[in-house]
Amino acid sequence: MTKLSFETLKFYDKGEYIRVNFLRNYELRLNKVDLERIGPVSVDEKEVNSINFEDVSESKAEKKFMFLLTNGFKDLINIYTNKKTTYIHRNSGIPLIGTRFIGIHDRGSTLLEIKPLTGCNANCVFCSVDEGKDSKKSYDFVVEKDYLVEETAKLLKFKGKEGIHIYINPHGEPLLYYDIVELIRDLKKIEFVDEITIITNGMLLTKELIDELAKAGLSTLNISISGYEIDKAKELMSTKAYDIDKIKEILKYAKDKIKVIITPVWIDGLNDKEIEKLIQFAKEDGLEIQIQKFCYNKGGRNPSKGIEWDDFFEKLKVLEEKYKIKLIQDTFKLDKTKEYSCPFKKDEVIKAEVISFGRYKTEKIAVAEGRCILVQDCFKNGKIKLKISHIKDNIIIGKAVRK
């Protein structure tokens, strides 16, 4: 018998097909008929990281199986969102710079955003990027950890600036990322990295995970809590799985291991009373709180139009006086650094190759000059002409040129 074993894959026999679990939160199916062409196939329930073939050499089984597996990855599904997913790895041909939603986002400062995946286990009524089960987006992405670390290290070497603060701030929930602990550990080893922050809804936090994150070098947990009472918290997060009491307890444990900041979104008229209760909770338990103003987002969910910034700060001043706590934050000053130059100019017409879908059915991701380009209103694959319509901070958007 030939046994093929994999660290990040698990196999389950479902009769007509083998279900392949990948990085815990993704799966694909391999047809039994196709697998049987390699040789009689079986899966041992006690060794789910392996798949077995009879009457075939290891080299032949591995070659044929990897062909089927590679094709199977074209139909990879995110089990949380049920969306088709692209796995971006170092051999995928997809750069990590160019889009807002995946990879590396650099604004030419000592703050660097890392986005290892898309998709969320919550469904917040105020989500600025429209993630979760009600999202209008059609596709998800997940990035290979080593590829993400390598490209980050290259960028930081180019910057050559000390005091880099990395924010793991994806369009989704970062704790869904299978390699989150290893990602933090490897990022922290990169020269120039000073601090690492995760922005999370906290639903997946456990004492064990907090210990691992602290040991790996995580500096700060920014916890998005916008409701204090059970029913209101579930309503705002729009999921029955949200357990605010569990999260409050786990934060009391976390504060002795990692810096914890509660970051509620104040949606005027929707969670006013909850904000005051969260202020009291933070004060009583020695947690820092940084209240965010809800802002209307064209592509997000908008339960309110939002209020003006002056009105927001006036409300914070009132609560500062009432609870004797600092709520208006000092301006966070970032040092400027070098950033990669963009190889394109606005309105330039270029040739590129469409290599993946985007987030929506009407979008594609094209690649040219080592950059990803989000192409709007595009339904083609392969080589295309496109006109660059947006360039800022190496975020590049274009539109297909129709002949």
Image (tube, rainbow, N blue to C red):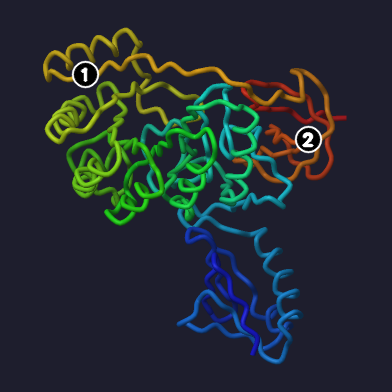
The residue closer to the viewer here, 272 or 276, is: 276
Viewer-closest of 302 and 51: 51
Query: 175 left or right of 59?
Result: left
- Mark 1 secondary-structure assignment: loop
CB atoms of marks 1 and 2 within 8 Å? no
Q: Quadrant of residue 274?
A: top left
Image point (70%, 44%), residue name: 94
Inspect the image, locate mark 2, and give the three-letter code of the amino acid beneath it: Ala
Residue found 23% across the figure and 42% down from its top: 256
Amino acid type shown at disc 1: Lys
Q: CA distance from mark 1 to mark 2?
A: 48 Å
Q: x, y percentage for residue 65?
A: 70, 74
Residue assigned mark 1: 326
Image quadrant holding the N terminus, namely bottom right
Query: Marks 1 and 2: which is nearer the front?
Result: 1
Q: Position of residue 269 (x, y in %)?
A: 25, 22
Q: Residue at x 51, y 47 (%)?
A: 186
- Rendered location of residue 335, percent (x, y): 50, 18
Mark 2 Cα-neighbour bin, 10 Å: few <14, some 14–19, many ≥20: some
In which quarter of the view is residue 292 placed?
Answer: top left
Judging from the image, what secondary structure is the residue with disc 2 in?
A: strand
